[in-house]
Image: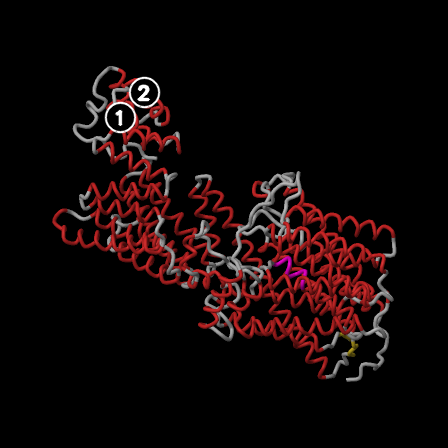
Amino acid sequence: MKTSTKIKELPKEVSSFAETGERVSKIALELLIFLMPILFLPWTVNVLEFNKQALLIVMVLIALFAWFLKVLISGKVNFSLSLIHLPLIVLFLVYLFSTIFSLWPYGSFWGWPQITSESLLSLLGLVLFYFLLSNIFERKEIFNVLALFILSGSLAMLYGILQLFGKFFLPIGFTKTASFNTIGGVNNLGIFAAGLLPLIIICLVAAKKIHYRVFFFGALVVSTVLLLLINFQIAWWLLLTASVLIIVFGFQRRDIFDGRWLVLPIFFLVLALLFSFFRFQIPGFAQPPVEVFLKQQPSFSIAWQALRESPIFGTGPGTFVYNFSKYKALNFNQDFFWNLRFEWAGSKILTILGTNGILGVLAFLTLLGFFVFYGIRFLLVRDRASANFWLPSFGVFISFLVLSIGFFLYGSNLTIDFTYFLILGSTIVIFAPPKKEFILKPSSLLTLGLTFTFTVIFIFGLGIFILEGQRYIASVSCLKGIELWQQGQNEKALKQLERAVKIAPQNDFYWQELSQLYIQNINEIAKSADLSQEEVIKKIQFYINNAVNSTKEATNRNPENVVNWSVQGFVYQSLIGVVGGTKDQAVISYERAGQLEPTNPYFPTQTGISLLKEAETLTQDKQGEREKLLSDAQEKFEKAIELKTDYAPARFQMAMVYQAKGKEAEMLEELEKTKDFAPNDIGLAFQLGLVYYQRGNFERAKTELERTTSLNPNYANALYFLGLTYEKLGRRDDAIKIFERVVALNPDHPIATAVLNNLKTGQEPLKGVIEEQPPQAPIKE
């Protein structure tokens, strides 16, 4: 098809429709560019990434459909043809196949509740954005596009500064913390600022009008202050790299780059060197929130082990958390944050290595290599570069290099990935040859092919649009349900969560939450005095069935998620003694969770607790079975202690096994050992005090019970036994004061009231209450 063929001029009305289509496309993309750094919405479970992904998909589809309309109406298409597009297409295809063979294809495609930025849908939106940006905008328009993004980025950075200074002006609860900003984590905000700063510097140099220079200078000040506030070493390394690159390229092309402006990169070079090596905090600046992230060495080790299992396409986009759970080293248990599950590696490239395999890394490196090659060639070949376009292209290229290096040093998120693709698209507009125009003749194969392609993409895009809307509604319902649950409105919460699973049944997170709410409702119904016994039994049976079915749905939807098996184990464990056979199901669930996360001591501990609970339900005629259960439980607790020697819950449960076996001395010894590992554990302190009380060691009981009430002054059961202990030690007045507090906390409790009356009338405190031994826990907390 000849690109120079002339066609007759379109009628005015038709031409107007075509222009409207192009204008809608540009407005949609400009809105996306402006809103992406600053958008968050409070009515979904994930307030940042989920909403940014929805914005990306909606705006890109609007722009794409409007562009299709413009092409079909005008009868011609202008397209940027370049080999530089190929690595991006290859990267998308690798992600596509990686999603197909993923551990959880649903999560790898959609993202949340997995990492949204790593999902195939997010990459699809970014690739389409890149395609539209590079084909709709002209070279002369790119400067304004970049200025718009810098404006939005500056607003996001300014908001981040206010947050770090504790100036919380938004009336939303979760925003009132220094760690919240509209980019992501505080460290990600620093990476964003470091990646944007070289572009701001070059735009300031390139700007001709005074108002532009004032604007870019303001953006430069904001980003600098933010970097000083965050003081993140990797951000300083990136700024150091950017400064060196600007100096080198600026000196190389001093025929275009005014040497007087080199004072800016030199200033930032010195600043970055100073803060990189000396790591000091500026007096008067608030200490930024500390973020915990996975280091490079364990990240590589985990990614490498995942690669050995799935070398070609990895385990699937967004599945690094499964790799971390399965392959993390045992020495993680010695760390203070041992129970955290990291959803991404220490860098984006290592995340890609584990989740998208060898092909994923090669595709990304090829993409990087292509753009580096074309960028350097454009910037250094003198007969192609002019002053008008060399400076903006210079800024775009340096930001591209900085963000690329950042991907090797730290993780990313959707806003940073969007920035990267904005830079890539801008690079194409500036570097690539002029667009070619193709005329769509009514009877040509090209017209037929494009029409068919547009129709398929339109139908597919419309389907994505509808499904994304359903996911959004489900997330809103889930958040409402969680909020109602926290407010104690369980019935209303159930309706919202049931609505969420009905709309988005493939999302395992909703099933997790729903199953736990059913279990809580069972406990609430059991305490209810407003229902007859028959109604209570009927409702409990209903909720038991629903809880079990919900947790089965979660594990069936995503069997690789350790949390699903943990929740299923919790549900079955909660039903031990109520429903027969639930002990075996609890053990199976926790053992499966242990296979998915073999170094976590929580799962053998919970397995042991399930066995211990079952043993407590057995009668005396099943002594042999009881002893077997206690021995099996002890083995599980010993295994947990092997995994983490200072794991207090396992040691505490070991003491409970000794108690069940009648070995009081061993129980007490184990509890004392446990106290060394968990000095601030309220339940442990109370249990120790109770044991000493029962053994008649009232001085030690007093010490432990006073420690318990110092940790929680309103712990009614601890106060109860502390009052009894004071009476045993001859401190009746102190005992009366303590029981007055108990009665104040539980004004209608008959036992506490009776004991207080006995103390005040000089009688034995338990007279008429309990004949021999005091109750273990007289008050329901």
Q: Position of residue 260 (x, y in %)?
A: 85, 57
| Mark number, residue 724 | 1
Q: Position of residue 106 (x, y in %)?
A: 49, 65
Q: Residues within 10 Å of mark 1 (few under 14, many from 20)?
A: many
- Name which quarter of the figure residue 137 lies in: bottom right
- Residue 260 as seen in the image, left or right of residue 282: right
Q: Count the labels in the image.
A: 2
Circle 1: residue type: Leu
Which residue position is annotated with label 2? 734
Q: Which residues are magenta?
A: 414-420
**What residue is at 42 percent from the left and 51 percent from the top?**
514
Q: Position of residue 207 (x, y in %)?
A: 84, 57
Q: Residues within 10 Å of mark 2 (few under 14, many from 20)?
A: some
Q: Nearer the viewer, residue 688 or 477?
A: 688
Q: Position of residue 761 (x, y in %)?
A: 24, 15
Circle 2: residue type: Asp
In the picture as drawn, the residue positioned furthest to the left comes out as 621
Q: Nearer the viewer, residue 557 or 504?
A: 557
Q: Nearer the viewer, residue 481 or 717?
A: 717
* Secondary element type, mark 2: helix
The secondary structure making up most of the magenta span is helix
**What residue is at 33 percent from the left and 28 percent from the top?**
719
Q: Nearer the viewer, residue 705 or 243?
A: 243
**Which quadrant would the C terminus be assigned to in this image?**
top left
Residues at discs 2 and 1 in contact (Cβ within 8 Å) = no
First-in-chain label (2 vs 1): 1
- Residue 646 as seen in the image, left or right of residue 728: right
**What residue is at 74 percent from the left and 83 percent from the top?**
443
**What residue is at 23 percent from the left and 15 percent from the top?**
762
Was residue 702 drawn as part of the magenta stretch in this picture? no
* Secondary element type, mark 1: helix
Q: Quote the CA–CA distance across marks 2 and 1.
A: 10 Å
